[in-house]
Image: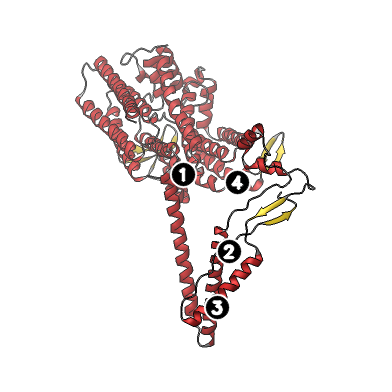
Amino acid sequence: MIVTRLRQMSLMLFAMAVSFIGFFQMFERTAGSFPSEYMILLGVVAVLFIILWSLLLKFQPYASQSILPCVLLLTGIGITLISRIDQQKGTHVGTRQLIWLCLALVLCCILVICLRDYRVLRRFSYVSMVAGIVLLLSPMIPGLGKTIGGARIWIGIGSYSLQPGEFAKLFIAFFFAAYLFDHRDQLAVGGKKVLGLQLPRIKDLGPIVVVWAMSMGVLVIQRDLGTSLMFFAMFVCMLYVATGRKSWIVIGILAFAAGAVIASRMFAHVDNRIDAWLHPFDAKVYNRQGGSEQLVTGLFGLASGGLMGTGLGQGHPSLTPLANSDFIYSSVGEELGLTGLLAVLALYLVIIASGLITAMKIKDGFGKLLASGLVFTMAVQVFTVVGGITLVIPLTGLTMPFMAAGGSSLIANYILITLLLIISNAANKPEPELTSDTFQYEALAVLRDHELKERAKSAAQTAKDDENQPRHGAHASHASHVAHAAHAEDTEDAAQATQIEDAPTIMVDDASQPEGLYDAEEQDDHDEQGDWADWRDFAVDDDSPATTTSHWPTRGAHAEQVEDAQNQAAQDGNAGTPPTPPAPPQSTPRTVKGGAR
């Protein structure tokens, strides 16, 4: 165990060392010195990461140890590039991001201490649904919501802005996991087959229709293609995990595609993004407001990085609009090259694979759905951002988890990772050995407690019945006679049970065979097969005469002994002496024709 903990600690120290070396190299090339405010903030972040890791060892000792180092390394790369862009633009987004990171780590520590068992979240399924919908629709409140980049997905708090959809995805995931766990049997039942596709029943289409309408409502009202895609993909993936039917995935993809096509015809914002995706280098699309200028600039930044990148502090990532948030992946490709891009994807792949392994290992259905929903949410978010920057799909406006600038996204994703760690602790916890003495003792103690509770409950019920129905006179006398009769019957049963236990065993002899029945070879076979060989040897045929000698006492002898004991007891009673118990019955052999089968 000590070696395992040291290996896990070495992963954390390695991630911290790589992040510090990146900061040091970048600042030496851009500013010529390491700023003191970054030194203090990085020290606080390192201490908080060590505290979080220590709390996980104490309260969640079986949690996956490969997730947290990857998250630390991704966060370090992201803040390093954000600080690099600050050096060119003269902003201070990097220091604010470090402060948000400290707040996220404090919340994660509190969550690890307080949330010992994730299953408590199932009790608040509908509360989570209401909270998620309120957070999702809060930007539409007049005076509170803000429109940035053509999408109304922000709320303004003073000089700061918050994206509530990042927190809404957590509450919606809680609700989906609880709802699908309770209704998975109804959703798994298929309806008619159309073109080889197993369609669900009409009455089971209600949940997916509601979620589809909610996603399309977000797309229509807030003009946010990425958030609606993330919610809808999360629900469809969890629905597939709950039911195992591929038809739900096909129906979900077709439903979202139909909704996106309708939205592109109705809203110019969505249509512009689709045109920029299809024709990014067209002059008309490039020069148009909300066109493909940002996308093309990011593509040129990726191209300038090449295989190994320009190096930290030697590129020009600030030329790309929103290079520290929406296009942070393009900034990584410019200064770290294709190698850095693949390393970042590998870190995300480790986190997602660890989450999927947790979802497969956990036996609790709610935990399985919750883990898979959280992991699919992160996977879809990474895919949409990387796919949008590399022209695989249209731009969606989502941000890279742990890397992009933004406090709401950072805190929400750190809470998501903490929930995955708590679920992985339950998945990796070893089961108690059923053959151990401790487990058997605990099981017997539980059974004994249950038996004592049942006896106490029965005695209380009997006493209550006696109080409700008092007995007087003849009734009491009758009850007394009944009690004496029951006691006598129990005594007689106990005596019979004792006599049966003390009775001698039955000895069976086959009179049709001589004593030397088995030779040496048959005796070895008899030793190997045990008592079943004896029964096989007796099964010869029904006509073979045999005698069975039993040492049970004969009926006549026992009756005579009982009668003599009663006469002797009567004589002793007259003499004033206590009766003498009868002697044990003598066993006499009996012979039964036909043998024992």
Badge nearest the viewer, 2 or 4:
2
Q: Name above or below for residue 181 compared with residue 394.
A: below
| Residue 131 visible in rendering | no
Q: Position of residue 507 (x, y in %)?
A: 63, 51
For label 2, count other residues whose C-alpha is less than 10 Å away and answer few (under 14), some (14-19) or many (20+).
some
N-terminal of the pair, mark 2 or mark 4, is 4
Q: Is residue 121 left or right of residue 312?
A: right
Whether pointer 2 and pointer 3 mark residues with C-beta atoms closer than 8 Å, the reply is no
Q: Which mark is residue 174?
A: 1
- Residue 92, by quadrant, is top left
Report, in whole angstroms, how far the alpha carbon at label 2 lies from the one at label 1: 75 Å
Q: How is the image coloured?
A: secondary structure
- Residue at label 3? 482
N-terminal of the pair, mark 2 or mark 1, is 1
> What residue sits 32% from the left and 16% below the top?
312
Q: Is residue 182 left or right of residue 518?
A: left
> What residue sits 57% from the left and 77% below the top?
567
Report, in whole angstroms, how far the alpha carbon at label 4 lies from the one at label 1: 19 Å
Badge nearest the viewer, 2 or 3:
2
Residue type at the position of mark 4: Asp
Q: Which mark is residue 185?
A: 4
Q: Position of residue 353 (x, y in %)?
A: 47, 29
N-terminal of the pair, mark 1 or mark 3, is 1
- Residue at label 2? 585
Whether pointer 4 and pointer 3 mark residues with C-beta atoms closer than 8 Å, the reply is no
Of 573 and 397, the residue lying toward us: 573
Residue type at the position of mark 3: Val
Q: How many labels sit on residues?
A: 4
| Residue 4 visible in rendering | yes
Badge nearest the viewer, 2 or 1:
2
